[in-house]
Image (cartoon, rainbow, N blue to C red):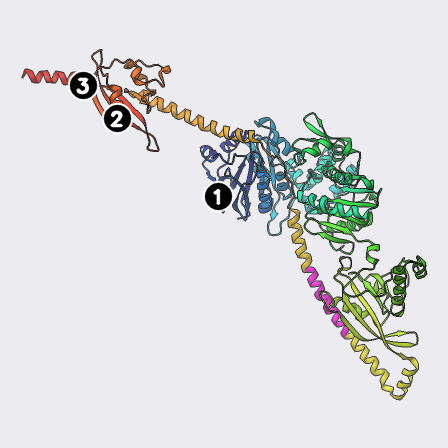
Amino acid sequence: MKTSLRVVGIGASAGGLEALEQLFAHANVKSGMAYILVQHLAPDQKSLLSQILQKLTSMSVIEASDGLKVVANSVYVNPPDSDISVKNGCLHLVKANRKHGLSTQINKFLFSLARDQRHSAIAVILSGMGNDGALGLQAIKEAHGITAVQTPESASYDSMPINAIKTQCVDIISKPETLLDDIQRFIDKEPVKIAATNVTESPLVDPVQLDSIISLLKIRNGHDFSMYRSATLTRRVERRMAIHRCVTIRQYNKFLQDNQQESDFLFKEILIGVTSFFRDPMVWDYFSNKILPTLMDVRQAGHTFRIWCAGCSTGEEAYTIGMIFSEIIEKHPDKRFGLKIFGTDVSDDAITAARLGVYTKKSCSNINEKRLEYFFDDYEDSFKVNQNLRKNILFAVHDVTKDPPFTKLDMIFCRNLLIYFDPILQKKLIPKFHHCLLPAGYLLLGSAETIGDCSHLFTDIHAEFRCYQHIDAKQIYSPVQSKIPLLPVYHRGSEPLADIGNSDPLSSNRLQLAADHILLQVFAPAAVVVNTEADIVYISGHTGTYLEPAAGKANWNFLAMAREGIRQPIALALKRLSGRQAPLHIRNLFMQSGTSRINVKVTLQKLYDPAVLRGMTMIVFEHTHTKTKSSTSKKSLLNPDLTQTQHNQQSMEEIQSLREEVHSSNLDLINSKKSMQSANEQLQSANEELMTSKEEMQSMNEELQTINSELQSKLDDLELAKSDMQNVLNSVDIAILFLDKQLNIRRFTDRAQDIIQLRDSDLGRPLSDLNSSLRYPQLHIDAASTLSSLVESEKEIFTTDQRCYLVRIIPYHRLDNVIDGVVITLQDITANKKDEIHENQINCDH
């Protein structure tokens, strides 16, 4: 699809037909836009929407079909039994699989439109019950598209427009008859897009003015947006510029400085709150069935779980956590677990709403009846969180980027918050989260977020659900089984050997463990285990010969502690070890130790099991033999060139090693650059997608309202056709009777009342029961004969007042060629008959 084509996704439900008629009655048929209509329809009822709308516009109105390409100046209507989406500029249909009366099809379609069209997408929400389309509207705005809503006052049912407006993601609110014109004017004010990179390049915004606006917001609203993604900030500023018709950012900056209220509007514009109860149900199922039971198994009785929900918005996610935790804790009454949840956000309005805990019944549609009854109370037309849930949750205004974090936490939920921060800020926050968590704690991120290069701090538990577990020092240093036996295991902070041996002399198992520990410590080779950053996490045996603490601040990095002669070769070997399964051996490394020159063999092995050691490397040292200074001196005296040759050889080896290291570094840099570019593209794509959850949509009443509107429109057309037909029949000076198969009166013209005594109340009466001035007693017999034989009958019949009529009886054919009665026409031929009689008399006289 060409990037110039803009696709307008229109969502409507009950009362939407009237709004659609007004919308397309005033639509520019040459706007260059394509319109895709998604309306809640009964799956088993044929839709008349395309026929109705075709009368209002000269654009082609087509019922959508699978694979149909979207073209400009066309209208596409969703079939009643299918969910519709758009991909690569083509429509795709999927058989609807939903309960009768429930639908999320508008949201689903707008999600696909946001992914496919991105900044070229336009969302319009019209009249309807419920809140379908609200989440999709947010997705369109996240993709930098345009969002528009019908004014609630002009809607027959205002629930959908009101819920859409509550998202604070709406650009235009207008009546249906002016809505498309307002969208066109909004487009004309928009900045230029660079479609190839999906980045907004605006001639209106420059970094200096943007920094000035950020500084002003920091002074007035107390929040620093300098570490937010510049593309997001630019887009929000440009939207406010378009609303106030500011041509340049300098004008908007001046307007912002003069208006305190505009600062508040821009602040809220940047802080998009997107949340709901039990959003992403599969994540919550995994959380309650897998994560919580595992976490509770490692916590002692009486432990109080501390949970931090960062960026909680209006509190739905924090309350969701509270409901699930409370239910699981109640299943372990013997352990007397406690619960404290901290819900934080930078928005005062959001935290105020969260503290109040009042939510509409539609927003609580994802909560089952049992939870609603236990955790909520009825509050007017809404639900309010009760003390069973509220007592466990503390809400506070908190800026995760600068305020001190909560500590000693069991879990951190930070879902769909990091995507608004630049990578530098993300890189600072992940270690902070690690510091806040207790051992075995969990970090849950949004679907478009990752921990980046902090894999040494967290274990990836479930990649799809972005679930990570805290890696603690005690976990890292614990003796565990590996592919390579970790022979002498020792870690910093362990108890002295004497304590291990004397802790329980009566226990043979502990005695054997202590003896094994001493033997391994004394007689096994020296070894260390390092992580991906070459920091030492395990020390085994006597490593003092090979490692020496560096001067200055304590540094446990292996490359900083390794002695001269082995540091550079091992550093190069660590880089070569990536992706290698087999051990890597380095022989004939010479290292100076005091007056001795030591020949060392080093073995490096990448560790893959168990999970806690995955990605780490074991380095084992073996001392082969020693050359003393005196023996070396004697050999040097016997062979004066020996020392020089050795020095030259060592120099050549070091030069070659440096060359290989530089080459390897260059390759790593190239690969890193490609990986970063790929990751950046994936992140940009992921950031444009907004994860959403199921919510209850329209009931049977809504579908019936839609069907009723269509049928009413069709009925109006039929009434008009009936009027036209009646006028045509009455304008013809012929009496006509329509009889059904039982020869009962179905319809008649006014002229027929002059011949047969008929009134409107006679409809449905048998023809034989009616009085007539015709001298035609066998009229109903001939009518029955025509109905059975399908042979027309034609006779000249006189009336009691001496008028003559040509009576024709013909079968009544329906459009589907079914015989459904007879038609009797009575044409007055009295004048013709008199002329004929007069002519016959003249002929007789002659």
- Write down the residue under mark 3: 832
Q: Secondary structure at mark 1?
A: loop
Mark 3 crowdedness (10 Å alpha carbons): few <14, some 14-19, many ≥20: few
- The numbered mark, 3 or 1, whose residue comes first in the sequence reads 1
Q: Secondary structure at mark 2?
A: helix
Q: Which mark is residue 786?
A: 2
Q: Against 809, is 562 above or below?
A: below
- Pick whichever, 421 or 634, lies toward us: 634
Looking at the image, residue 329 sits to the left or right of residue 829; the answer is right
Q: Nearer the viewer, mark 2 or mark 1?
A: 2
Q: Which residue is mark 1?
A: 65
Amino acid type at image mark 2: Thr
Q: CA distance from mark 2 to mark 1?
A: 47 Å
The crowd level at tag 1 (other Cα within 10 Å; few <14, some 14-19, many 20+) is some
Quadrant for residue 508, please give it. bottom right
Region rendered in magenta: 656-673
Q: How many marks?
A: 3
State how far apart marks 3 and 1 are (Cα).
Answer: 61 Å
Q: Position of residue 715 (x, y in %)?
A: 44, 26
Gap between marks 3 and 2, in whole Å? 26 Å
> Residue 474: where, in percent of width, then height?
84, 55
Question: Mark 3 or mark 2: which comes first in sequence?
Answer: 2
